[in-house]
Amino acid sequence: MSTIEISSDVLTESFERTAGGLARTYRVGDETYTSDVTTERSTGDDRGDWWQAFLDGAVPVSRQYRGQLRTLDLFCGPGGLALGFGQAARELGYSVVSEAALDGDEGAHRVYRSNHETRTAATAAIGSAIIDYQVRGVAEKAKFRYDPEILDERFAHLPGSVDVVLAGPPCQGHSNLNNHTRRSDRRNELYLAVPAFAVAIDAEMVIIENVPAVIHDRGQVVDSTINLLRTAGYEVSTGRFFADRMGWPQTRQRFFLLARKGKTPLDPALVQSALNEPEPRPIWWAIGELEHAEVDGLMVPPIELSDENRRRIQWLFDNDAHDLALSERPECHQDGTTYNSVYGRLYLDRPAPTITSGFMTPGRGRYIHPTQRRTLSPREAARLQGFPDTYRFHPDESEPSSKAQLGKWIGDAVPMPLGHGAGLAVLAARGL
């Protein structure tokens, strides 16, 4: 047997080798949560072996069943947040039922429904036709003018039927890549629809994720949401999770707002500290097995490249380089650029940069495969985002209308490890 242990003031994680594979145990105060996965991997990296089993499709089995959790997922996308939360829930002894999910992207919504077996689903923009609410004041003065109410009859059954609200409101309005309407984009206000839903259906727990820059929104949507939830009886914790600090092979972070009635969610900083590792795993840890993978629908072949981009990739490999020389870049970059990673080749022994929707395009970042003269494939990017190989991105034999659409679903998703950390913080919350 081998045991490793990483701890913080409130959360302890340990692993133990078993006859059938690997056991993972969390301890929070007097509570102990142990689950098992079946795996033949034994590399000496217990947490790495655990997550490799997850990527292979293994499902943890808890040694103590604690009950069922019903979820409502708003702005659900293809289901990255639900995936991470569900993994944490199962490890802590809960089964998860996707009671309802909403998203305006029909394709992403179809992927979500297929993987999470959602009972009630609708492709619709979240607005006044679905929920009625108004907020007066901002930040610590924010209050609902009246009790929020579900208007759409398809979701009339949700009050009293949902335990957890998961949400990833549109983040483009907060993104540092948005130089036009950043901080004042009208889409930022959709953040406030989440506490409205939570109050309207009387959910016990809330998890909201977004880009870190959301805290700088001029409308103060985060502070307003905190006050709306606290006024409704929730305890709130906020903070960031960093995938690479957890040892995951991608440098990505997200801001989370966590709320629960009757208990205070663990501080994300403390959970992050408990799950920190000295170094992130390299990209090859996640995608090495796929180097010579057989063609798998749209999940392996990368996008077709232009002659110019093909020439740039050849130059990188012919010169054993990872950064493209200025002379090989487009003319507008040849006098210098602050985006050195653009047209860059990934390092075999380092984590990947943030995976975005442009991971199949060399001009969108450092996305050229470390050993092959091509960009990352959708399957490889999905693994780096924490999607297991069993996750269905083309349900019912249907396929995305374009690889750009597939890239958007994968690149915009919440990486599984981040949703997993948020799930631990909410579900292992401390009593008041």
Image (cartoon, rainbow, N blue to C red):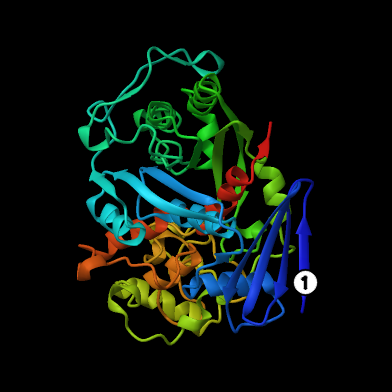
Residue 345 vs residue 266: left or right?
A: left
Is the residue marked by circle 1 packed among few (<14), some (14-19), or many (20+) residues within 10 Å?
few
Residue flagged by tag 1: what amino acid is it? Thr
Give percent across and percent down for residue 338: 53, 53
Residue 321 is drawn in which quadrant? bottom right
Vertical relation: 431 (above or below) 408: above
Q: Tally the marks.
A: 1
The percent coordinates of residue 266 (x first, y second) are 66, 41
Identified at 20% across, 62% down, the residue is 401
Above or below, 118 against 75 in this view is below
Residue appearing at x 61%, y 64% in the figure: 63
Q: Quadrant of residue 197?
A: top left
Q: Which residue is mark 1?
A: 3
Nearest to the observer: residue 79 or residue 409: 79
Where disc 1 sits, the SS reads strand
* Residue 152 percent location from the top left of the image: 23, 31
